[in-house]
Structures are given as structure tokens and as C-alpha cells.
């Protein structure tokens, strides 16, 4: 099919979709992506305002000892003792830390990744890496419209995800927060029943219901309004953006899949003239840089959400920092006092490998879905989408390298590839990032997943991250 015919069809499709709901949604996402810095700053300011609001309402730092209003009490499961717990907004990693820092950064990187797609396509066409089936330069407008059509097709799925996630957040707020905070004496007695324990699968006794704690004098309506704003900004809209944002990027992997490119009579091939060992695929670095940063931060958000849910239900843990980093101080002291005699087994035996059941007091298999459902779902989506995008891009790239090698020198219109250039294709490195290897990234993912079972491995993860940052800065300064 001629390029001019492809362009005509692209323009016809574009005109037919201009007024559709999904096209307007797609343009709204593009509008946000164009202003990613402003979006990130706005979200950061919202997070800071929530922190200030938590100070003013008295929920930034709140201790829960099990005592409720009207002489009621939340107990520990049999065989455990409920110790006073710090459950304030400012000490919860899934609220203050996430709302003010992690969530704005992850959303900014997702928007940057979306913004990078069309310039990437243009660069691929300019460098003769995205060519027609007969190795000619394709019509730029036709290819861009093909991408936009794919993007529009994903909007119904994005909309459905937003509706479902937002609905679950509202339901969670009503059942976990509102019905407890606004309950009168009779209603609160009924909710506590014969003895609700801190292990309850549906209820969480933290800052969001602090008005019912015997130790506070917080107005219930002030408490519930602030909690509602925090849930709306972080748990509802923030979660919607993360879930929908990552699911949306299935479209990137699908667009660059060999099957879809062949449908549009296109193919993705390397550029053996590039001096980089990636043979031209370094042009994907800007997209993958933003996408992978967003993925790693989203995985940390999911882990923080999970750890906080475990902590709130762990009767014998008084602070989330001591639950997660408990053995670190002991390890440091042992290293200082007995460095010459300390063995790896001593470090692992210090509590670093206490699993989630040992820390929380749950019976094996008894951790409720409420504790890990949303966090593990987000973590899985991040891993699956990354795997999908990377797998299809890599497959298309290798297929293109094989096709180009088989065609021989001078096969691409407008190129001057020589036989020596094509020899480089046998050692092509498709991974687009230079600052992190695929093996190191997979190791980070494995450590984060391992932290779900052994929460105190977070300390090891932090130590490795700090070490990596120091090495990177040192190399940058030395260079």
C-alpha cells in the first residue's frame, strides 16, 4: 500500500474519532502529559497541605492503646498483648510519604513516558529504524495516527479501571472510616460487638478513626472530613492514576509488537550505523527511563501500603519503623563490638528473616485479603506491564535484526549500510537503559517481592539503594 494512501486513511480515521468520548479522554491525558511538571508540583503541594491539615486536626501523631470512647476496648488475639501503637498520619508510609513524595513522582514519570512516545516514533522514522515492509520511509502522519488510534482504543479499559478503583476506595472509606468515626454510643457498641480484635480483616484503627479513641479529643466531623479529603486525594485519585496509568501502557507494548507493526505494513529494525552497542535502540531510553522509574516507585508504594496494613494489625509492634527496621540497631552494635567474630548466620538470626506471620501474629494462611489485596495487585500489574512492554519490544527488535541481516547491505532505502555494519547485529544489545542493567532491575524486583514475606528485608533494600546512590555519585564526581 502506498504511503499517500496510508496517510489518507490515517486522516480519515482521525477525523472520524475527533468527537468521541474516548478521543477526548486521550487528549485530556496528553494535555496532562504536556504539563507533567505542573501536575507533579500540584500533587506535592496537596500532600504538604494534607500534612499541615493533619497537624491542625491532631492526627499527625496519634497513639492507639486499644481504649475507645464509652469504655469500649479493642483487644489483641488470644495469646498476644496489644502494646500502644503509633498510628498517626505522618508516620504511615502509605499516607504522608506516599501522598507528598512518592505518588507525585510516580505520576510525573508516567506522564513523561506518555509524552515521550510520539517524539520517539518520529525519531525512529527519521533514523530509518521504523520502515515499511519494503524498507522504505513510512508516512509520518500515518504512523502517528496509528499510535493515537491504539491509544484511543485503550481508553475504555482505562475508564473501567478508574471506575472500579474509585468505587473500591469509596466503599473502603465508608466501611472502615465513616461508620466508625460518626457512630454514636449505641452504634459503636454494636460495631465492637463481642470483641473486635486488632486483627480484624475489615477495620483499621489508625488516624482516620482517631476521634473514637479514648485518649483523644478530636471532633468526629473534623476527623471524617479530613480523612475523606485524604482518601480522595491519595487512596482514590492517586490509586486510580497508578492502576490506570500502568494498564494503559499495555498499548505501548502492543503497538510495537511484531504482529501489530506487520498489520500496518511496518517493521522495527536496528540502526547498525549507531556507535552504541544497542544499535539505535538507545532512542527508547527516554521512554524506558521514565517508565521504569515510575514502576520502581509504584512498587515501593505498594510495599509501603502492605507493610502499613500488616503493622496496624500486629498487636505487639509499637512503631512501623521498629517492625521493619527492628534488628538493624542490634546488627550495627554487633558489628561495632564483635566485627571480627560476627558471621552471616548471626546477622540472619538477629530477626532479619522473621516472616510476616511471626511479626503480625496471624496464623499461617490467615492474613486477610484486605491487608495485601490492593498492594499485591498493584505490584503484580507493575511487573506484568513491564514484562509485556519489554518482551514485545525485544521480540520486534530481534526480528528486525534478523530480517535486516538476511536482506544484506544497501537494503534500506536511503541508507548506506555496509557488510561490516551488519556484522554488529549479531552482538546487538536491545536493553535500552544505560544507568541500570536488566539483571540489576530484576534483582530489585525480586528483593521488593521478597519483602512481602520477610518485611525486615526492607532494611537490606534501603542499604543497597543507599550504597548504589553513593557509588553513582562518586563515579559522577570522579568522572
Image: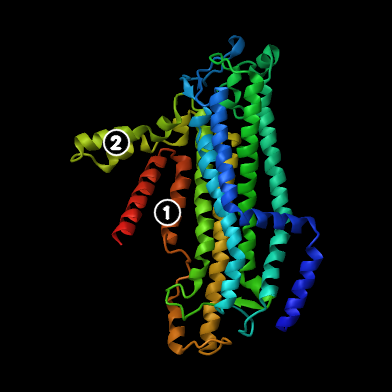
* SS at mark 1 in the image: helix
Q: Give the number of the disc on residue 331.
A: 2
User: 68 or 146, which lies in front?
Assistant: 146
> Label 2: few (<14), some or many (≥20) within 10 Å?
some
> For residue 177, what is the image quadrant?
top right
> For residue 331, what is the image quadrant?
top left
Q: Is residue 330 left or right of residue 192?
A: left
Q: Give the number of the disc on residue 274.
A: none
Q: Which residue is mark 1?
A: 443
Q: Residue at x 57, y 33 (%)?
A: 50
Give how far across and how far down residue 73 sits, in percent: 57, 14
Q: Is residue 164 left or right of residue 135?
A: right
User: Quick check: 61 above or below 259?
Assistant: above
Q: Residue at x 56, y 88 (%)?
A: 411
User: Quick check: 376 above or below 23?
Assistant: above
User: Quick check: 11 above or below 33?
Assistant: below
Amino acid at each position: 500500500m502506498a504511503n499517500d494512501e496510508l496517510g489518507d486513511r490515517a486522516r480519515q480515521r482521525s477525523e472520524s474519532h475527533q468527537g468521541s468520548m474516548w478521543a477526548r479522554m486521550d487528549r485530556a491525558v496528553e494535555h496532562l502529559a504536556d504539563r507533567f511538571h505542573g501536575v507533579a508540583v500540584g500533587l506535592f503541594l496537596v500532600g504538604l497541605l494534607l500534612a499541615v491539615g493533619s497537624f491542625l486536626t491532631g492526627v499527625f501523631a496519634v497513639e492507639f492503646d486499644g481504649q475507645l470512647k464509652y469504655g469500649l476496648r479493642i483487644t489483641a488475639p488470644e495469646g498476644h498483648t496489644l502494646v500502644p501503637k503509633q498510628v498517626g498520619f505522618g508516620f504511615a508510609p502509605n499516607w504522608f510519604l506516599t501522598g507528598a513524595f512518592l505518588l507525585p513522582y510516580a505520576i510525573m514519570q508516567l506522564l513523561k513516558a506518555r509524552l515521550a512516545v510520539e517524539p520517539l516514533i518520529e525519531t525512529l522514522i527519521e533514523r530509518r529504524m521504523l520502515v515499511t515492509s519494503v524498507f522504505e520511509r513510512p508516512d509520518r502522519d500515518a504512523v502517528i495516527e496509528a499510535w493515537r488510534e491504539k491509544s484511543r482504543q485503550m481508553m475504555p479499559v482505562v475508564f473501567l479501571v478508574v471506575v472500579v478503583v474509585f468505587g473500591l476506595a469509596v466503599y473502603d472509606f465508608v466501611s472502615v472510616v465513616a461508620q466508625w468515626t460518626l457512630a454514636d454510643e449505641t452504634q459503636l457498641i454494636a460495631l465492637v460487638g463481642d470483641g473486635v480484635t486488632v486483627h480484624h480483616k475489615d477495620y483499621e484503627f489508625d488516624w482516620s478513626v482517631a476521634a473514637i479513641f479514648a485518649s483523644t479529643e478530636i471532633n468526629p466531623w473534623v476527623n471524617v472530613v479530613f480523612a475523606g479529603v485524604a482518601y480522595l486525594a491519595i487512596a482514590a485519585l492517586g490509586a486510580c492514576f497508578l492502576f490506570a496509568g500502568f494498564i494503559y501502557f499495555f498499548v505501548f507494548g502492543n503497538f510495537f509488537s511484531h504482529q501489530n507493526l506487520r498489520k500496518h505494513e511496518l517493521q522495527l529494525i536496528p540502526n547498525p550505523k549507531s556507535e552504541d552497542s544497542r544499535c539505535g535502540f538507545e532512542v527508547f531510553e527516554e521512554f524506558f527511563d521514565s517508565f521504569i522509574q515510575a514502576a520502581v516507585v509504584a512498587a515501593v508504594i505498594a510495599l509501603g501500603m502492605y507493610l502499613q496494613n500488616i503493622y496496624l494489625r500486629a498487636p505487639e509492634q509499637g512503631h512501623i519503623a521498629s517492625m521493619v527496621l527492628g534488628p538493624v540497631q542490634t546488627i550495627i552494635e554487633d558489628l561495632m563490638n564483635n566485627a571480627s567474630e560476627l558471621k552471616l548466620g548471626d546477622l540472619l538470626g538477629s530477626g532479619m528473616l522473621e516472616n510476616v506471620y511471626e511479626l503480625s501474629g496471624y496464623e499461617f494462611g490467615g492474613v486477610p485479603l484486605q491487608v495485601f489485596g490492593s498492594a499485591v495487585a498493584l505490584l503484580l500489574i507493575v511487573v506484568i506491564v513491564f514484562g509485556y512492554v519489554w518482551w514485545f519490544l525485544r521480540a520486534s527488535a530481534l526480528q528486525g535484526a534478523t530480517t535486516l541481516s538476511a536482506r544484506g547491505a544497501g537494503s534500506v532505502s536511503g541508507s548506506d549500510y555496509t557488510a561490516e555494519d551488519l556484522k554488529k547485529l549479531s552482538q546487538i544489545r536491545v536493553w535500552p537503559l544505560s544507568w541500570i542493567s536488566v539483571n540489576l532491575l530484576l534483582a530489585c524486583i525480586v528483593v521488593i517481592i521478597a519483602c512481602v514475606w520477610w518485611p525486615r528485608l526492607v532494611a537490606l533494600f534501603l542499604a543497597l539503594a543507599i550504597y548504589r546512590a553513593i557509588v553513582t555519585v562518586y563515579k559522577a564526581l570522579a568522572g
